[in-house]
Image (cartoon, rainbow, N blue to C red):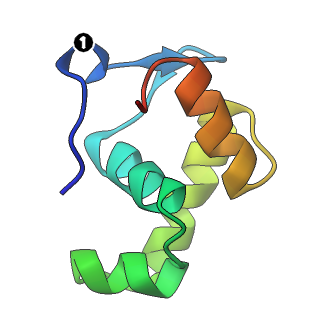
């Protein structure tokens, strides 16, 4: 599992919506360059579930892709 900074467990970015712990974990794996398939297998969930979480991450971070989502999360202090 990803190591999260406890100060940012309920971190809010851009539109004020907090990222869930699962969304932060997925962002951490995206930061490491993992594919949707690899992330799904780590959490024992379907690729469609990963896509669902990624859609929410993009909306909450104001991102258009995974790279931008990771960058925005870093700027917000959610990822180290």
Image position of 63 (left or right of 60) = right
The x, y position of residue 36, in whole percent, is 52, 78
- The residue at 53%/65% (across/down) is 52
**Position of residue 51 measured from the top left corner of the image (x, y, whole percent):** 56, 70
Q: Residue tagged by mark 1?
A: 7
User: Which residue is at the front of the view, 69 or 56?
Assistant: 69
Please tell me which residue is depicted at 52% across the width and 60% down the height of the picture.
30
Identity of the residue drawn at 42% across and 33% down:
19
Residue 33, relative to residue 25: is it above or below? below
Q: Quadrant of the N terminus?
A: bottom left
Q: Is residue 9 left or right of residue 69?
A: left
Q: Considering the numbered disc 1 on the image, is that residue within a helix, a strand or a loop? A: helix
User: What count of labels does the image hold?
Assistant: 1
Residue nearest the observer in this picture, 72 or 57? 72
Residue 72 spot, x, y in % from top left:
65, 30
Q: Report crowding for label 1: few under 14, some 14 to 19, many 20 or more residues within 10 A (C-alpha).
A: few
State the residue in front, 30 or 56. 30
Q: Residue furthest right?
A: 64
State the image coordinates of residue 10 (x, y, percent, origin top left): 31, 20
Eyeballing the image, is 11 above or below 55? above
- The C terminus: image quadrant: top left
At 46% from the left and 18% from the top, the residue drawn is 77
């Amino acid at each position: 599992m990803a190591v999260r900074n406890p100060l940012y467990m309920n971190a809010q970015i851009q539109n004020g919506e907090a990222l869930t712990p699962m969304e932060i974990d997925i962002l951490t794996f995206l930061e490491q360059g993992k594919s949707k398939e690899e992330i799904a297998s780590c959490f024992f969930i379907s690729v469609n579930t990963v896509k669902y979480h990624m859609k929410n991450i993009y909306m909450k971070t104001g991102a258009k892709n995974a790279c931008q989502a990771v960058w925005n999360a870093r700027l917000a202090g959610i990822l180290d």
